[in-house]
Amino acid sequence: MCANSYASFRRGLTGHLSFAIAAAALGSAFQHGYNTGVVNAPRDVIMKFINATYTERFNEEPGEQTVTIIFSIMVSIFCIGGMVGALGTAYVAETFGRKGSLLLNNILVFIAAGLMVFSKMAKSYEMLIIGRFFIGLNSGLNAGLVPMYLIEVSPTYLRGAVGTIYQLVITITILISQIVGLPQVLGTEEHWPYVFGMTLIPAIFMLATMPLCPESPRYILIFQGKELAAQKALTWFRGTIEVHDEMDEMRSEYEATKLVPKVTLHEMWTNPVLRTPLIISVVVMLSQQLSGINAAIFFSTKIFESAGLNKETALYATLGMGSINILMTIVSLVLVEKAGRRTLHLVGLGGMGIITVLLTLCMALKTLVPWLSYLSIIWVIGFVVMFATGPGSIPWFLVTELFGQGARAIATSIAVAVNWSANFVVGLSFLPLTTVMGDYTFLIFTVFLAIFWIFTYKRVPETKNKTIEEITSIFRQQIYQ
Ligand SMILES: *[C@@H]1O[C@H](CO)[C@@H](O)[C@H](O)[C@H]1NC(C)=O
């Protein structure tokens, strides 16, 4: 049985498919992950740059508050760009196709990199801010386009594993950005613009590789109505001309699409066949961001320091956490086709929920029982492990699995925009929250996680090993029962 599934795994993962996965995922998810983490390590040198630029321009030194505000705008405008980009996904993906959009999206990288790299020379922190907005736009588009392309070109029994690759590249590139930004590497007063210039490398990689891959066969068949071209593309991906079963499956998705009138926002909301999976997609996206993962990572340095690690060791501990995130995402990639999406998501959310309680207990009691600080380290690591088990990767591709071709792009747009918005809100609110709630901040996430767990348990269907047509019919049956 095991050898059998391994054999079919190997058969499905042809050289061509692997190449297409690399071409689509490496260049795109790099921008999403790298630019999420890139501002942390060189924080001090960038603040110095803002200070010096401001001083020279206005002939007076800015207050500490002014520098912090400008820096925070630069950090958070990335998420705003992400939101706007996500909202544009549907239009772009349907107009230029998945592949065409991914290629065009690199124009934004060149604009962003130009602005950010030359901001120091031009003595303009505004350029840095606008550059971060553009790379946010690019990342927001990627977060919808790439999982869509990956899911559409993968055979059914590999969809989850291939979809997980988007998050895997994010975790890897967050770690890369933290290393590249270190003062020992490029995070110096002189060289920090190159940290932002690194974004050009994956863009060039994608421009060199993606043109060699075909457009998604589902897009070719269902949007362009070109049956023969779709079959040719599918043959390329599968490495065999025996693609009749899959062509049949795509045709039935096509037929089902025709039953639904042109999908609009209004239709998404009023038609229960579409509304139910849309609500599931949005809640699953929220569960990723409102799980408190970013708060935990932010807190981790403090937790490590309060356990007596010095600043430098705490930094390495942060890099260690990034590595654990990567390793666990790989484990999840292997498990997702066996255990299923729903199960892994439930295990992840449940584990995170329990850990928030244990962590809060340890933090609250640490003055009474000092060794509890060490236990806190274990809980923070466990929190990241549980995140990577399911909530880290599954939301990105689950939304594209829940919809047929007609509604997929628009649903992805909405769900991914919700993800970036939640990311933005958590980023802005957790510092003020910690001043109010102190050691008890994580209890907020306990409540969220409990709600998301119950919702997932009651409403999220298992999509493992089901064709898209089988999945969408679940929602049709729910209505006509
Ligand atoms: C700005 O730079 C000046 C000169 O290096 C320094 O004295 C001042 O403390 C800095 N201000 C802030 C807010 O960092």
Image: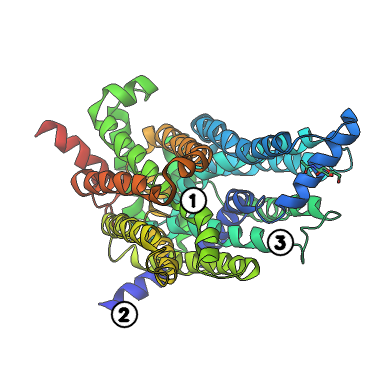
* Residue 375: image location, x then y, percent: 40, 70
Real-space CA distance between mark 2 and mark 3, rounded to the nearest whole angstrom: 41 Å
Q: Which residue is mark 1?
A: 294
Q: Residue 242: tell me if it is visible.
A: no
Tell whether label 3 touches label 2 (CB within 8 Å): no
Is residue 106 or residue 137 the one in the foreground? 137
Q: Nearer the viewer, mark 2 or mark 1?
A: 1
Choose top left, top right, bottom left or bottom right for residue 124: top right
Tell me if 207 is positioned left or right of 321 in this view. Answer: right
Q: Which residue is mark 3?
A: 180
Q: Which residue is mark 2?
A: 3
Is residue 305 or residue 276 the one in the foreground? 305
For badge 1, the amino acid type reads: Asn
Tell me if 368 is positioned left or right of 26 in this view. Answer: left
Residue occupying the point 31% across, 60% down: 351
Rate crowding at label 2 as few (under 14), some (14 to 19) or many (20 or more) other CA atoms within 10 Å.
few
